[in-house]
């Protein structure tokens, strides 16, 4: 029997009331009732129920008229669809409320005003449809919300507009694609006290990584002002990632933090007609994060509590999509919406698709960079769309497979977006409208590009790649690539553990699903080169170098951080933390920096600190830098970053590895510098590994074993130095062979010595996957682990399986 109640308190409803109040309102009420014990705050309000909407339609005799209009419309025809939506919305917006409903809404609004001790309290008027949280249809964002509404007449107008928004062009089209009849779906409206985020901040958050589906992280996006700028993609928001397992243990588990481009914000307007307006942000807001670390941790904890609650109710893991707001007056956080995430939580696929772009010179073909949404690649013809085209979509010759390029997408463009091979926008972040729709459609999107509409032209053939990490690239022309599909169910467990070499932190969460034994090599050089981009000593000393251009360039890069050291430590720690959290609690071996002088020279400011060496490959690199007067201040920052990762964030699965260490004396000197900067082998469980890549590491292995926890064989440098050749020289390249008897004998000696001393030995390199006989050799010798690049993982698994089976057969 239908509940005929027109008005309900928000706190009186729960998830069992979706048919009465819609999914969004049921969820808000559920949190008000059950999450107060976790101190989760939700603003109070009241609900105009689905029954009120149905009686409003009946009172104005609109159902038959609306049915007739939709029946006579081909909703796949954009012109007809626009006319249909416009006519229906006009019918609803010009209709009137029954007197009794008008009276009840007025009384409920007065009660809410009294509760907050305000005359005509400012409220958000939010639509809530009964179908928006169904497991097989994501209706989120299909209906409207109106902000900073006050006064009875404004409330009634906004409510009618919410009713009308059930029939936006996109909602009519969306329902048809999912087979819903318009009157199978009801709509309810929530009148909820506004959070003063107009003078604070707001945004969205997910209890899952929206790109990879990684379960153990909370991802928060936010900007200053009201949250519409984030949802609509007007700005590129700040982004924070918090590792859930360690957050729940009480650690400051922020594993990533990225400053967005928040050049505008939405605030209250000064007049009664335009309730909100867009204004530029201040210089302080541009250079600062919208949330403090304390805010981020509190919000992440709430999101975990919400996820746990919904998972208990539903009887299965239920990741959440949350909207939040920070009141700038009271400095209190609030949750203003929570709903189940509907993309990754539905994926049960055991298949992994990998892409390999074979063009080694593709960097020269990059036109535009942005934030990658999705993990695939598309190619097609650029089709620029401007906001002025909104009313003329039917005139656009937008063909299936075109690349949609625009400033920011409009929800009414969804019929076009369904045809697109990829979406590219100047503005927006991972949670903007373009990103959400792209995920639902399973197409790549590259958002927040800033100037894509200027650099791309109609008709250009381009490749849009989201398969290379968090950064998306637009390449000119059709770049050659291969697509490979692997089924995890086809992999067998090997007796020899297989680890991964992970270079890019952006790829870590996507790789976490591989059946791996941890990370055998995470190179700091990649993070320094791609994320920090400045020579470490230049970050420390640029102010005293009296180089105006260098100072200007560095200060642009460290924007948002108080100084160069803070920038370096935070950036390096976040890069390491993303990798370590992806594979937690499995071991992640992080190698300290091992740039050669010529490579350091190429970093910004590097020419001021690097000597010229005839042969940098065997010069001032690795361990010899760490204790030198010219570099140990920079190495101290590496130690501080590791300290932050292990002790503050709590990722104690991080193992450090020292590269290119020539003597035991040199190793002990490095230990002294590490200890001075808070890192001591054995303290708090810290393990230290040594790269075995120099003949002295093999010859003196017995002595080295007394001071380390493990070796990792660097077969490239070991081959070079055992055979006495420069691996960069084409003249002797034919001699380079890591399967040479001398190299193999060195490896055999090392493994034998280390095993006798109880010290682990692994290897990181392509050899085992490229050469099955080399893999068999390593297995025969009893290597403890083999670590390979992700693209070689599946092949290596097969090779090691075969090697182990052959050995069993022989024995």
Image: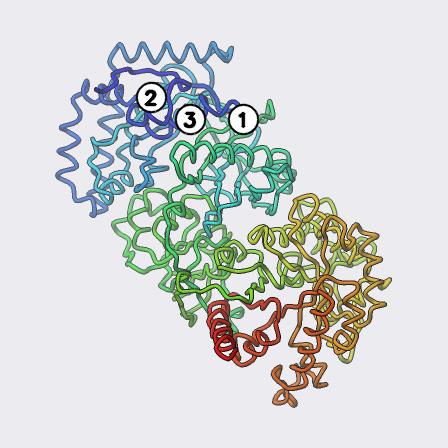
Badge nearest the viewer, 1 or 3: 1
The quadrant the N terminus occupies is: top left
Q: CA distance from mark 1 to mark 3?
A: 15 Å
Q: Which mark is residue 157?
A: 2
Residue shown at the point (48%, 32%) measured from the top left: 306
Q: Which mark is residue 117?
A: none
Relative placement, left or right, of 514 versus 56 is: right
**Mark 3 packing: few (<14 Cα in 10 Å), some, or many (20+)?**
many
In front here: 186 or 194? Answer: 186
Q: Residue 338, percent across and down?
A: 43, 33
Q: Residue 508, percent across and down?
A: 54, 56
Q: Which mark is residue 38?
A: 1
Q: CA distance from mark 1 to mark 2?
A: 36 Å
In front here: 425 or 309? Answer: 309
Q: Tell me the quarter of the picture where residue 98 sits.
A: top left
Residue shown at the point (63%, 68%) measured from the top left: 762
Tag 2, which secondary structure? helix
Q: Which residue is mark 3?
A: 28
Q: Is residue 514 visible?
A: yes
**Mark 2 packing: few (<14 Cα in 10 Å), some, or many (20+)?**
some
Relative placement, left or right, of 28 versus 645 is: left
1 or 3: tag closer to the N-terminus: 3
Badge nearest the viewer, 2 or 3: 3
Q: Residue 363, percent across and down?
A: 53, 68
In front here: 730 or 724? Answer: 724
Tag 1, which secondary structure? helix
1 or 2: tag closer to the N-terminus: 1
**Mark 1 packing: few (<14 Cα in 10 Å), some, or many (20+)?**
few
Q: Residue 212, percent across and down?
A: 46, 52
When the figure is inspected, residue 45 is found, relative to residue 291, above or below; the finding is: above
Q: Is residue 359 visible?
A: no
Tag 3, which secondary structure? helix
């Amino acid at each position: 029997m239908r509940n005929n109640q027109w008005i309900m308190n928000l706190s009186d409803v729960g998830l069992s009331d979706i048919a009465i109040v819609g999914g969004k309102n049921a969820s808000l009420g559920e949190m008000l009732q059950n999450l107060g014990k976790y101190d989760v705050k939700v603003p109070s309000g009241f609900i105009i129920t689905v029954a009120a909407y149905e009686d409003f339609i009946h009172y104005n005799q609109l159902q038959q008229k609306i049915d007739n209009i939709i029946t006579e419309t081909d909703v796949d025809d954009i012109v007809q669809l626009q006319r249909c939506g416009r006519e229906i919305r006009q019918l609803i917006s010009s209709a009137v409320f029954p007197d009794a409903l008008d009276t009840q809404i007025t009384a409920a609004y007065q009660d809410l005003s009294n509760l907050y001790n305000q005359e005509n309290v400012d409220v958000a008027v939010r639509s809530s449809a009964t179908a928006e949280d169904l497991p097989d249809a994501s209706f989120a964002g299909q209906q409207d919300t109106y902000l900073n509404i006050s006064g009875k007449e404004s409330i009634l107008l906004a409510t009618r507009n919410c009713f009308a928004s059930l029939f936006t062009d996109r909602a009519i089209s969306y329902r048809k694609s999912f087979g819903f009849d318009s009157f199978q779906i009801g709509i309810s409206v929530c009148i909820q006290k506004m959070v003063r985020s107009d003078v604070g901040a707001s945004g969205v958050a997910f209890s899952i990584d929206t790109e990879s589906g990684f379960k153990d992280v909370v991802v928060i996006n936010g900007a200053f002002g009201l949250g519409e700028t984030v949802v609509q993609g007007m700005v590129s928001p700040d982004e924070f990632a918090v590792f859930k397992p360690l957050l729940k243990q009480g650690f400051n588990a922020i594993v990533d933090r990225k400053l967005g481009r928040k050049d505008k914000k939405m605030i209250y307007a000064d007049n009664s007609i335009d309730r909100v307006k867009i204004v530029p942000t201040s210089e302080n807001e541009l250079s600062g994060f919208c949330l403090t670390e304390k805010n981020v941790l509190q919000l992440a904890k709430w999101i975990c509590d919400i996820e746990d609650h919904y998972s208990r109710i539903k009887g299965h893991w239920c990741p959440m999509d949350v909207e939040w707001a920070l009141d700038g007056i009271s400095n209190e956080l609030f949750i203003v919406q929570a709903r189940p995430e509907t993309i990754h939580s539905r994926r049960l696929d055991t298949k992994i698709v990998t892409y390999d772009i074979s063009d080694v010179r593709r960097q020269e073909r990059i036109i535009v960079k942005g934030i990658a949404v999705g993990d695939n690649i598309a190619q097609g013809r650029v089709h620029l769309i401007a906001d002025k085209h909104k009313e003329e979509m039917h005139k656009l010759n937008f063909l299936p497979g075109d690349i949609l390029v625009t400033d920011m997408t409009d929800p009414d463009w969804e019929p076009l977006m369904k045809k697109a091979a990829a979406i590219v926008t100047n503005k927006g972040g991972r949670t903007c409208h373009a990103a959400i729709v792209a995920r639902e459609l399973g197409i790549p999107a590259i958002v927040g590009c800033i100037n894509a509409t200027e650099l791309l032209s109609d008709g250009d053939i381009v490749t849009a790649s989201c398969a290379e990490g968090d950064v998306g690239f637009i390449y000119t022309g059709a770049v050659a690539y291969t697509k490979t599909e692997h089924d995890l169910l086809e992999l067998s467990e090997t007796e020899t553990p297989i680890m991964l070499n992970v270079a890019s932190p952006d790829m870590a969460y996507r790789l976490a699903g591989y059946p791996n034994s941890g990370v055998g090599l995470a190179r700091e050089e990649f993070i320094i080169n791609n994320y920090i981009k400045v020579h470490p000593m230049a970050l420390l000393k640029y102010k005293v170098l009296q180089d105006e251009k260098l100072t200007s360039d560095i200060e642009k890069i460290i924007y948002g951080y108080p100084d160069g050291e803070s920038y370096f430590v935070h950036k390096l720690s976040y890069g390491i933390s993303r990798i370590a959290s992806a594979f937690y609690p499995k071991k992640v071996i992080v190698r300290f920096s091992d740039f050669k002088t010529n490579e350091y020279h190429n970093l910004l400011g590097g020419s001021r600190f690097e000597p010229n060496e005839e042969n940098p490959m065997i010069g001032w690199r690795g361990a010899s830098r760490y204790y030198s007067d010219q570099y140990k201040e920079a190495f101290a920052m590496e130690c501080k970053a590791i300290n932050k990762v292990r002790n503050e964030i709590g990722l104690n699965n991080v193992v450090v590895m020292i590269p290119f260490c020539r003597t035991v004396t040199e190793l002990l000197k490095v230990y002294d510098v590490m200890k001075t900067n808070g890192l001591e082998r054995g303290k708090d469980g810290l393990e230290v590994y040594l790269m075995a890549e120099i003949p002295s590491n093999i010859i003196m292995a017995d002595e080295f074993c007394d001071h380390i926890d493990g070796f990792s064989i660097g077969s490239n440098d070991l081959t070079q130095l055992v055979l006495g050749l420069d691996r960069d020289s084409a003249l002797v390249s034919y001699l380079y062979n890591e399967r040479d008897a001398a190299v193999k004998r060195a490896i055999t000696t090392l493994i034998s010595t280390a095993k006798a001393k109880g010290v682990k030995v692994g290897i990181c390199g392509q050899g085992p996957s490229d050469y099955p006989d080399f893999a068999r050799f390593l297995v025969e010798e009893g290597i403890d682990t083999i670590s390979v690049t992700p693209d070689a993982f599946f092949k290596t698994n097969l090779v090691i399986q075969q090697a182990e089976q052959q050995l069993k057969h022989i024995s």
